[in-house]
Image: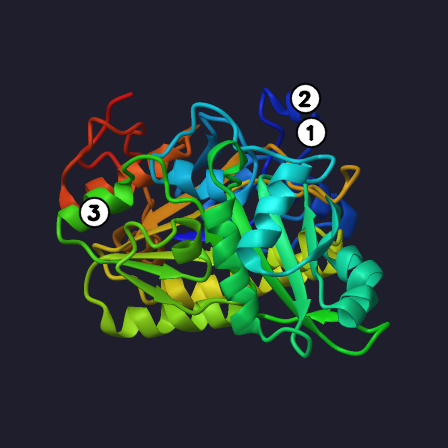
Amino acid sequence: MLVIDACGVGALPDAGAYGDEGTNTLAHVAQAAGGLALPVLGSLGLGSILPLDGVPAASDPAIHGRLHALGPGKDSVTGHWEMMGVVLESPLPTYPHGFPADATARLVQAMGHEVIGNAPYNGIAAIEQLGSEHLRTGALILYTSQDSVLQLAAHVERLAPEDLYRACEAARRAMSGEHAVGRVIARPFTGPEGAFQRTTGRRDFALRPPGRSYLDVLQDAGVDVHGVGKIDDLFAGVGVTQAHPGASNAQALESVDELLARVEEGLVFVNLIETDQLYGHRKDVRGFVGALEEVDRRLGLLLGRLREDDLLVVTADHGVDPAHPGTDHTREYAPLLAASGEMIRRRLAGERAGGCRHDGPLADVGASVLGWLTGRDAKELPGRSFTGKPRDRS
């Protein structure tokens, strides 16, 4: 299960309430790039989900469609939680004007570090504008965004990453009750003044999911869940059997290759972060396209390794439209592409794959994974299987 972070495919009906009306990340990236060259994703049906410059509709698509959120939010926590059947009744707190004095005082006391900033920032701008002051004073750079996040940045030579992580753990404990943000994010950076760069040492300290998820149900059924990249962080370790590295797309896909070589059964749940973290928030269309093309190439290799009873799912968690004002996430549909190893074999043999259109909530992913791996359903959780085996109820 590959989540290509931030690859939204059109504004949700309520996007206007988030200031995101008219957004469409992949369509606008394709337009800005003069078309996309994604032969593998295209053959699975990416161009059959929506009109996409350079990616024609597939003649024989796999399972394809658009998935929508049932609850509020437009970030990685809510997106990934909803895929696994955890739907929030009310939005997580956000801080468009920075954190209030009482929360900041609690934070400073818990961490034992002073803070500077305390405003919504683009992450790169935060360290560029405040990094020198941080080096002089030692105060941590505190910032947020439109999402429910509290981010803390520190130069690796002023505060070792391990100490920054400990400060973030203390911040996670302190930010509770009405200030229970979705994620506390550690952002170590390096480099001389005027040339600061974030490292790959980012760590996310998320809230525990407020209810049971399909990951819990899988584990109860004896199915191992392998979280690659920030999956383990996003679920606060709940429902994840083992975490594997994935600070970059290359590292995440290397973890996938290693797991496919040795794991006979289970769920490999992967976040591919670069389209969001490196390119989406920076409105770097060329970098975004390059990341997509590399995922497409690696996906072609992965398809050849699928056994007949394996299931591949490709989706996203939200958008980050480069044509939209600002640099924050956007409230969008997620694409759905899914194919079994048997479907791939049939296509290679010149037969029809037997794919179909499927539109529904993000939770359909969790329902489908559970049904595929266990033959069971979880009536207490939202979602219905798009594989037709065995769960098919609304």
Pointers 3 and 2 in contact (CB under 8 A)?
no
Circle nearer the N terminus (1, 3): 1
Residue 345 figure quarter: bottom left
Q: Relative to the observer, which residue lies in front, 349 or 105?
A: 105
Query: Which element type, helix, strand or loop, lies under badge 3?
Result: helix
| Dot 1 crowding, Cα within 10 Å, few <14, some 14–19, many 20+ | many
Query: Which element type, helix, strand or loop, lies under badge 2?
Result: helix
Q: Please, which colouring scheme is shown?
A: rainbow
Tell me the distance, in whole angstroms, between the alpha carbons under discs 1 and 2. 5 Å
Pointers 1 and 2 in contact (CB under 8 A)?
yes
* Residue 16's disc number: 2
Q: Amino acid at mark 3?
A: Leu
Please state if 121 lies on the left or on the right of 344 as rendered: right
Tell me the distance, in whole angstroms, between the alpha carbons under discs 1 and 3. 35 Å
Query: Which element type, helix, strand or loop, lies under badge 1?
Result: loop
* Residue 20's disc number: 1
Circle nearer the N terminus (3, 2): 2
Q: Relative to the observer, which residue lies in front, 24 or 46?
A: 24
Please state if 283 lies on the left or on the right of 90 as rendered: right
